Image (cartoon, helix red, strand yellow):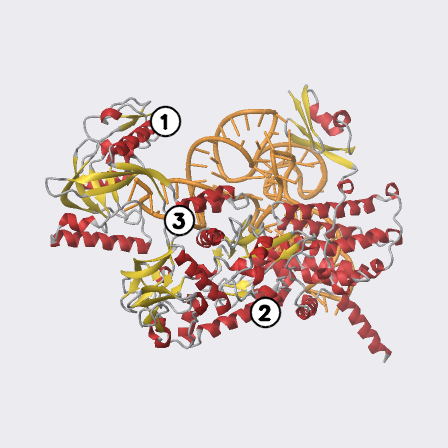
RNA sequence: GCCGGGAUGGCGGAACUGGCAGACGCAGCGGACUUAAAAUCCGCAGCUGUUAAAAGCGGCGUGGGGGUUCGAGUCCCCCUCUCGGCACCA
């Protein structure tokens, strides 16, 4: 009997020493579940500073992937750190829940999109909780539910009211086989993803657009002020907005053939206009048919060009062969009255500028290529001034580039000859304006945002069509326009909602007559353009947001997400913010002051994907190593901004480290729970004890600085690892009765330092070492440890000694030694002496605290 | 084509404003504990020459070539490869 007892006691001893993440994590998980308000932000707190940390909300695809884990591990570490520093932290989470995959899943598995989505959310939320992310779930936002999308519709009505939403006919991808509209992602190599042999067509459909371009200038200018955003993202947005200054110039269509039509071209290089030898129109330019009349041959050749353009666009083909059709007509250059041919060309885009250009082959590669092919004149009108080489009698072999320098020189340009390029642009624009055939202008590449989707699983656009009244908005009081359930969404063509008579048939609010509902739904980017405002008060029923509450929390202090959202989501969000501000319901100009884009998670050199079979499931990692290890590895493997190559052996490594920390704390926990011994005078401390104290303060310093600076959490974790390694080396001394005060300090601070990264373990440790600890660290505020700069300093400094830049030895001197002392010790050092043998010292460079370089000859 | 990252041991990565390259971790090697293994703990470890071996002493090393500097992974010029974004934008 007594044997049995012994064995059991022995076993339990062993179990106590062993790090068992499952046991620890399940225990805390259960506790946190039981106190749902643990991470809730105070609605208003005048005593504490607010901090809004936001991670991009996921699409509920079914399960979290490692990219999510990485994103949320970064955000959670930051949220917990700010929390421990006494901030009122808002750290919410939600679901970007509308979208195409739900429809595909519905078709494939015969599950309604709503059910599929909500069950995915339930699963992913459970995963997040199991991973220990500290979200304020009382503010959860699910975009596919009416309490949220109602406000999408409300905003749409406001957009419409302000002239920021409008309808126009536009091209969409159309699969003739499915008889339906395809999203761009469903077009693979110009063909339908479901019918790989079927070419996707471009069809004209009436679509709703949001006038993002009204804010082009502000969206661009605002980027300069977003200093907390990565330069990369700002550059990408600048390019996307694509502002360019130029001029519109009218070319009259040759009067000998017809009346007084003119073609307006856009050019950024009006200085080259004397070199224009043709006009090029986009195949879809409205004047094309007018110019070529009804010549069936020409018409079909222009159609070919259109088709080629569409194909190239769908296939992502750039710089394809240029083709053109001569219209048989001429235009007059308003500067020199020269008659030049009008062509239609495959390389001219209707969507940019005016869809018409003046072609200057001598100074543009594209025009040059085209002119060579179709034997159009090439005339040089500008040269670099320094070459002073007049052009040869023939045509140049290649376009004269670059020609934009300050010292450029115009030639063959009438009264503008001999001006520099920059002067010429100025004077020629003024000339064109003065003579009424041109004007300066600014063009943007940014286009209005087409938000109509001919799909089911999205926010219904709250508009009605009445035979008598035309387009009529749904009155605010009738919102939300509910998305009907049990809709047949199999691909039959057109919007699925169009096949639901109860939905389509409505009453006109103006005349009371019969009306038809808009059956398109909104792009899901609408949902994600303002969701973060909703978090500030997710349960409001009479307004989308409460202005004073938004004023308190906004702007977001730190937004964290993948760089793949650098353009679309982040431009739409910025646009929406400006629109809301102009509505007067918020007062900030930008959504977020700081943005962090984390790197991708890859494995074996490739992005994780099912087809490559290199997907690592967070669930498996948690089951094998625990949530703490999984999270810690996501932070430790590399700095957060870089690409992360997932290596399972690396997870094992951090798991081992957590075990080391756990065992050290647990076997000494009892010591530390006792009241601490008195601290003796510092001078009396043995070096090893002093070293531990120093390392403790150095570690706190390093981790704190990583949080405040570059977020290189990999080095924060490395610092804590070093600290633990040193604790192992000094355990014997440290556990001496005399140094209990330090041991207690060390254990507490170790738990606190781990708290942002490995919350389960940190709480477990805290509970073990503190008499009051049963609630764990999560109940604490204002607890981030502080370091004493004086205690981080070494007593002695080892100087590296170089002779002519080559390392030749080391000398140890007391800290704070004056330079002269350092110099003397260096010259007295035997190794240095040997290296200096027979040489003459020219000078000695002393870098304080680091290195000495003796320069000899 | 344009714009922006990146290239450091066998691997992931450190090195903040120029100052001991390779912290920390993985894999590896050696040792302790164990009947044994796992786990754990301690130690070694860039490449290379000299050497029986080691210590010691030296040489070479941050994609390649030049430069600035007492000193360069870090700054400047040129080049290669690679990843990402945009792409016929007039």
Chain of the residue that carries numbered disc 3 in the rendered image: A
Residue A678 vertical position relative to residue A337 in the rendered view, above or below: below
Chain of the residue that carries numbered disc 2 in the rendered image: A
Task: Name the residue beneath numbered marker 2.
Answer: A126
- Choose between B73 and A577: the one closer to the eye: A577
Task: Name the residue beneath numbered marker 1.
Answer: A406
Task: Name the residue beneath numbered marker 3.
Answer: A214
Image mark for residue A714: none
Q: Quadrant of the C terminus of chain A?
A: top right
Label 2 environment density (alpha carbons within 10 Å; few <14, some 14–19, many ≥20): few
Secondary structure, mark 2, is helix
Extreme bottom residue here?
Answer: A1
The quarter of the picture where residue A409 lies is top left
Identity of the residue drawn at 32% across and 23% down: A385
The answer to whether any part of residue A83 appears in the image is yes
User: Where does the image place residue A315, in percent across and percent down from the top left?
Assistant: 32, 55
Residue A59 vertical position relative to residue A406 in the rendered view, above or below: below
User: Where does the image place residue A27, in percent across and percent down from the top left?
Assistant: 70, 69
Check whether the beta carbons of the residues at disc 1 and disc 3 lie within 8 A of each other.
no
Q: Quadrant of the N terminus of chain A?
A: bottom right
């Amino acid at each position: 009997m007594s044997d049995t007892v012994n064995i059991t006691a022995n076993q339990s001893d062993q179990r106590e020493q062993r790090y068992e993440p499952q046991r620890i994590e399940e225990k805390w998980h259960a506790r946190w579940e039981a106190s749902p308000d643990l991470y809730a932000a105070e609605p208003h707190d005048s005593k504490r500073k607010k901090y809004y940390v936001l991670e991009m909300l996921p699409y509920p695809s079914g399960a979290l992937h490692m990219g999510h884990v990485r994103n949320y591990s970064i955000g959670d570490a930051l949220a917990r750190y700010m929390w421990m520093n006494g901030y009122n932290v808002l750290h919410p989470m939600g679901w970007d829940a509308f979208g195409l995959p739900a429809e595909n899943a519905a078709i494939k598995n015969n599950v309604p999109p709503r059910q599929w989505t909500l069950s995915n959310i339930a699963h992913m939320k459970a995963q997040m909780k199991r991973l220990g992310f500290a979200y304020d779930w009382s503010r959860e936002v699910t975009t596919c539910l009416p309490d949220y999308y109602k406000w999408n519709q409300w905003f749409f009505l406001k957009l419409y009211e302000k002239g920021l939403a409008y309808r126009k006919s536009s091209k969409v991808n159309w699969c003739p086989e499915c008889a339906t509209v395809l999203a761009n992602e469903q077009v693979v190599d110009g063909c339908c993803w479901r019918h790989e042999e079927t070419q996707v067509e471009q069809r004209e459909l009436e679509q709703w657009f949001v006038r993002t371009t009204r804010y082009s200038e502000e969206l661009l200018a605002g980027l300069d002020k977003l200093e907390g955003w990565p330069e990369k993202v700002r550059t990408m947005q600048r390019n996307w907005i694509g502002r360019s200054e130029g001029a519109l110039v009218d070319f009259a269509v040759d009067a000998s053939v017809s009346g007084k039509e003119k073609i307006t071209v856009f050019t950024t290089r009006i200085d080259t206009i004397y070199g224009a030898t043709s006009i090029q129109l986009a195949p879809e330019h409205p004047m094309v048919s007018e110019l070529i009349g009804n010549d069936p041959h020409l018409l079909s050749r222009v159609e070919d060009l259109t088709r080629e353009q569409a194909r190239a666009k769908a296939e992502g083909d750039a710089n394809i062969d240029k083709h053109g059709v001569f219209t048989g007509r001429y235009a007059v250059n308003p500067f020199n009255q020269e008659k030049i041919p009008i062509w239609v060309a495959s390389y001219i885009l209707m969507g940019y500028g005016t869809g018409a250009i003046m072609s200057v082959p001598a100074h543009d590669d594209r025009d040059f290529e085209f002119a060579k092919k179709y034997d159009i004149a090439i005339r040089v009108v500008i040269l670099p001034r320094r070459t002073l080489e007049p052009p040869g009698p023939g045509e140049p072999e290649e376009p004269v580039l670059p020609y934009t320098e300050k010292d450029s020189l115009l030639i063959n340009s009438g009264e503008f000859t001999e001006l520099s390029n920059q002067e010429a642009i100025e004077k020629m624009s003024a000339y064109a304006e003065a003579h009424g055939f041109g004007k300066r202008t600014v063009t943007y590449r940014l286009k209005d945002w087409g938000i109509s989707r001919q799909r089911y699983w999205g926010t219904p656009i709250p508009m009605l069509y009445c035979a008598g009244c035309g387009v009529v908005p749904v009155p605010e009081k009738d919102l939300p326009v509910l998305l009907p359930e049990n809709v047949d969404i199999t691909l039959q063509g057109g919007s699925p909602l169009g096949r639901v008579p109860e939905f389509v048939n409505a009453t006109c609010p103006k005349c009371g007559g019969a009306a038809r509902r808009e059956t398109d739904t909104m792009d899901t980017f609408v949902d994600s353009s303002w969701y973060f405002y909703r978090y500030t008060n997710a349960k409001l029923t009479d307004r989308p947001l409460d202005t004073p509450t938004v004023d308190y929390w906004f702007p977001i202090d730190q937004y964290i997400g993948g760089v793949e959202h650098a353009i679309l989501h982040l431009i739409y969000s910025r646009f929406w913010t400006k629109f809301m501000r102009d509505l007067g319901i918020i007062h900030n100009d930008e959504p977020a002051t700081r943005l962090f884009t984390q790197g991708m998670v890859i494995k074996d050199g490739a992005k994780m994907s099912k087809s490559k079979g290199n997907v690592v499931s967070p669930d498996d990692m948690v089951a094998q190593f625990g949530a703490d290890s999984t999270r810690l590895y996501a932070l430790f493997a590399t700095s957060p901004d870089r690409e992360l190559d997932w290596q399972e052996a690396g997870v094992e490594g951090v798991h081992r480290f957590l075990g080391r920390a756990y065992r050290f704390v647990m076997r000494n926990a009892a010591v530390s729970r006792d009241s601490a011994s008195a601290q003796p005078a510092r001078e009396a401390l043995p070096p090893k004890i002093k070293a531990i104290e120093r390392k403790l303060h150095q570690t706190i310093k390093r981790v704190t600085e990583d949080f405040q600076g570059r977020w290189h959490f990999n080095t924060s974790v490395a610092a804590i690892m070093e600290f633990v390694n040193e604790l192992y080396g000094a355990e014997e001394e440290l556990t001496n009765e005399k140094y209990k005060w330090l041991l207690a300090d060390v254990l507490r601070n170790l738990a606190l330092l781990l708290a942002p990264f490995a919350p389960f373990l940190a709480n477990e440790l805290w509970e073990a070492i503190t008499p009051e600890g049963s609630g764990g660290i999560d109940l604490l505020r204002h607890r981030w440890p502080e370091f004493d700069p004086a205690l981080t300093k070494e007593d002695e400094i080892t100087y590296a000694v170089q002779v002519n830049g080559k390392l030749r030895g080391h000398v140890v001197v007391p800290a704070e030694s004056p330079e002269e002392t350092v110099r003397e010790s260096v010259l007295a050092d035997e190794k240095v002496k040997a290296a200096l043998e027979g040489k003459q010292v020219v000078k000695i460079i002393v870098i304080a605290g680091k290195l000495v370089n003796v320069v000899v000859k």
